[in-house]
């Protein structure tokens, strides 16, 4: 049996250390570069990912690693693969908005089993591993007990992102069916769902490093993370988190 608690403790400590590094840059002057895909990157992104990689290499030198800024390295142990987003929400980070996160997930045999989402500027950490529970700053995290979509709150990032072909209509249907919408940048919307402060969060576009921690976090909190068709995956190119009780109704609303 895999020692998942050991991995969870390591990931939590590592995310905290990387987050502390980012706080040395946060709300201070620094240079911002633009990557080929048009997204911003800073020295804080690069240094935080380098810190995480060093810690993994020291503790688990054979493990494989994939990160947003430095790419993928396949170790001699391809069964264990760490996925890193050193700053999820770099645009928010650059503007001094505190909802950015350090995201760290561990896949074992291709399945996400351990996940940590640490919000350095908010002082919040959501951490989980299969069978170990989901924990929010040391207390057990559970999804909301709301049973109907009409009573639910929907957390989302930039509403304009949904206006691309094939996304505007599902987005409009969901907006009309929920009780309220919460503008929640970056990874924080998923944290709200895992801790029962919202019932639904979704993104029309996500890379795997944007969501690597969420499958175990949502499972252990009593919810679901996957794509808009209800597949539990981090490689669907999109993201959906909700409670188990609301999943069927949410998927029905998306499908129309």
Image: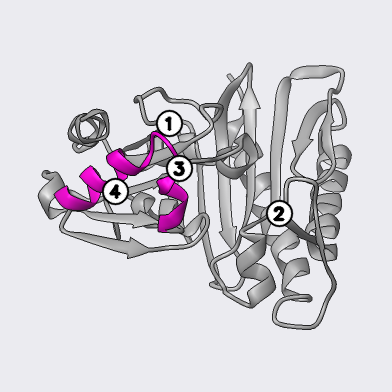
Quadrant containing the C terminus in the rendered view: top left
Near mark 2 (Cα within 10 A), the count class, few <14, some 14-19 or many ≥20, is few
Badge nearest the viewer, 1 or 4: 1
- Decide whether residue 165 is among the magenta residues: yes
Image vertical order of residue 150 relative to residue 239, above or below: below
Badge nearest the viewer, 1 or 2: 2
CA distance for labels 1 and 2: 24 Å
**Position of residue 142 in the picture relative to residue 218 (left or right):** left
Segment tinted magenta in the rendering: 159-177
CA distance for labels 4 and 2: 32 Å
Badge nearest the viewer, 3 or 4: 3
Q: Which mark is residue 164?
A: 3
**Position of residue 165 in the picture relative to residue 72 (left or right):** left
Near mark 4 (Cα within 10 A), the count class, few <14, some 14-19 or many ≥20, is many
Q: Earlier in the sequence, mark 3 or mark 4?
A: 4
Q: Position of residue 249 (x, y in %)?
A: 17, 34
Asked if the residue at tag 4 contacts the one at tag 1, i.e. Cβ–Cβ closer than 8 Å, the answer is: no
Q: Which mark is residue 27?
A: none
CA distance for labels 1 and 3: 20 Å
Residue that label 1 marks? 226
Residue that label 2 marks? 39
Asked whether the viewer can see residue 132, the reply is no
Quadrant position of residue 28: bottom right
């Amino acid at each position: 049996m895999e020692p998942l608690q050991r991995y969870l403790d390591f990931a939590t400590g590592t995310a905290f250390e990387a987050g502390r590094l980012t706080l040395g840059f946060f709300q201070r002057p620094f240079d911002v570069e633009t990557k080929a895909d048009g997204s911003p990157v800073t020295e804080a992104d690069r240094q935080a990912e380098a810190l995480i990689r060093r810690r993994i290499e020291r503790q688990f030198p054979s493990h494989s690693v994939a990160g947003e800024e430095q790419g993928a390295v396949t170790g001699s142990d391809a069964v264990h693969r760490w996925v890193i987003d050193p700053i999820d929400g770099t645009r928010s980070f650059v503007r001094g908005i505190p909802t950015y996160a350090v995201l760290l997930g561990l896949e074992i045999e291709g399945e996400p089993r351990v996940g940590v989402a640490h919000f350095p500027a908010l002082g919040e950490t959501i951490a989980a591993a299969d069978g170990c529970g989901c924990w929010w700053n040391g207390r057990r995290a559970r999804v909301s007990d709301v049973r109907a979509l009409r009573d639910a709150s929907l957390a989302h990032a930039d509403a304009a992102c949904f206006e691309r072909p094939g996304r505007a209509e599902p987005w409009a249907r969901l907006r009309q069916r929920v009780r309220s919408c919460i503008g929640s940048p970056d990874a924080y919307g998923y944290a709200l769902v895992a801790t029962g402060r919202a019932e639904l969060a979704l993104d029309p576009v996500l890379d795997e490093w944007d969501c690597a921690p969420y499958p175990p976090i949502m499972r252990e909190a009593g919810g679901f993370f996957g794509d808009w068709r209800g597949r539990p995956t981090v490689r669907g190119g999109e993201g959906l988190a909700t409670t188990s009780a609301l999943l069927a109704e949410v998927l029905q609303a998306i499908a129309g």
